Image (cartoon, grey):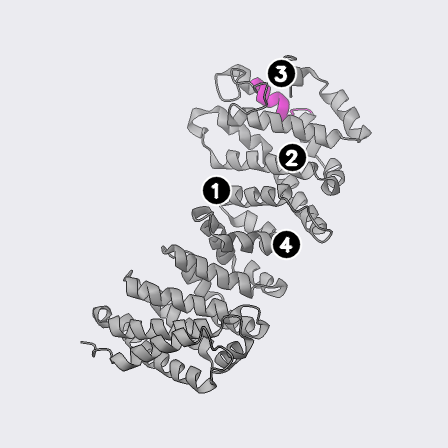
Amino acid sequence: PARPLPPPLLSSLHYLCFSLCFFLETAPRTIFQRVLDILKKSSHAVELACRDPAQVEHLASSLQLITECFRCLRNACIECSVNQNSIRNLDTIGVAVDLILLFRELRVEQESLLTAFRCGLQFLGNIASRNEDSQSIVWVHAFPELFLSCLNHPDKKIVAYSSMILFTSLNSERMKELEENLNIAIDVIEAHQKQPESEWPFLIITDHFLKSPELVKVMYAKMSNQERVTLLDLIIAKLVGDEPLTKDDIPVFLSHAELIASTFVDQCKMVLKLTSEQHADDEEALATIRLLDVLCEMTANTDLLSYLQVFPGLLEREIGEGNLLRLIHVAGNDTANIFSSSGRIRAEGDISNMAEGFKSHLIRLIGNLCYKNKDNQDKVRLFLGMFHIYIWFPLEYDI
């Protein structure tokens, strides 16, 4: 059995943890060395428990010490580069990452273990905050194993704190490493799916992923359709957000537009699967619908519109021979399904069902592609006319 925890040692750590919140700049390096020594010694019990699961029940005193050590180090790093540098130079980051990976290996959900786990991640986040040297060391030790271990953890706080570390450590060069470790990027998407209220996965995607067309392209090819819908939703959120796209954003979103448009051209007929009851919730078809939603928002942006107006096959796929408009209309008339004319767009503009939303957005996209573009206007007159539009949207409805 584990020895009883020496009360003076734990009390000292409690006091030190509290004091560091007020006397950050005056903390001597020897204190951090002492804390690191305690952390190393206590970690031996965790290593033993990893080798012998029967020892897990004897971890309580060691986990208390580890938790307090991490709290001391975490507090010492709050907006204090002096302490960040002192702690980093003791190789504390490597010790912390190794210990956190041991926590994950234990595969137990004791509250005391989870608390130590969370405090360790908070320490790594704080030591990396606004400190490029620390970010580099954290990345060297943490990537990719720590992120692969933590981003899919069942504990929400562990997912959030590991996302914070990833967000803080990422830069343009490290984004290239993510392209070779796509499971991490996809885990971030899944984390946002499960915890949409958590800011860190959201910020990783919007502030890092969406600034890398290369990463988005390879991610999109590997993701599930549900994950694709999540990513496309975030692209829409960026397009319609309060802050307009910047000059630096435009080239990036032109690359995204190429991916979205080419994928839609290739896959737009997948939406016809929805005419069958057995495919009524087909995820590939639902992802296709979201592609159209993104294209509508992209063509509403004047900086992206001109590129999409001349994108090969985009307008033709909608209005040319065997066009999507005609196919949907025919499918709706052949059998009773979600494309049938029983559902209409109400006068106030609400979409009565998903299929009506798709048809409405298809018309909207055609209209946007024709905006101040005579060539596209002529194509619409030649191939489509107004016949199909009037079929779906009688004159009494205001579209």
- Judging by the rendered image, the residue that carries numbered circle 4 is 211
Magenta-colored stretch includes residue 74? no
Q: Quadrant of residue 10?
A: bottom left
- Judging by the rendered image, the residue that carries numbered circle 3 is 397
Residue 250 percent location from the top left of the image: 71, 49
Q: Secondary structure at mark 4?
A: helix
Residue 277 percent location from the top left of the image: 43, 25
Residue 54 percent location from the top left of the image: 20, 69
First along the sequence among labels 2 and 3: 2
Alpha-carbon distance for marks 4 and 1? Answer: 21 Å
Residue 166 percent location from the top left of the image: 51, 62
Q: Amino acid at mark 2?
A: Cys
| Residue 296: image tag | 2
- Magenta segment range? 321-330
Q: Nearer the viewer, mark 2 or mark 3?
A: 3
First along the sequence among labels 4 and 1: 4
Alpha-carbon distance for marks 3 and 4? Answer: 41 Å
Alpha-carbon distance for marks 2 and 3? Answer: 21 Å
Instruction: Tell me the chief SS of the magenta region.
Output: helix
Residue contact at pointers 4 and 2, CB within 8 angstroms: no
Residue 170, placed above or below residue 395: below
- Please rate how many residues cluster around mark 1, counting C-alpha atoms within 10 Å: few if below 14, some from 14 to 19, many from 20: some
Q: Nearer the viewer, mark 2 or mark 1?
A: 2
The answer to whether 211 appears left or right of 277 in the picture is right
Which residue is pictured at 35% across the width and 77% down the height?
13
- Judging by the rendered image, the residue that carries numbered circle 1 is 226
First along the sequence among labels 4 and 2: 4
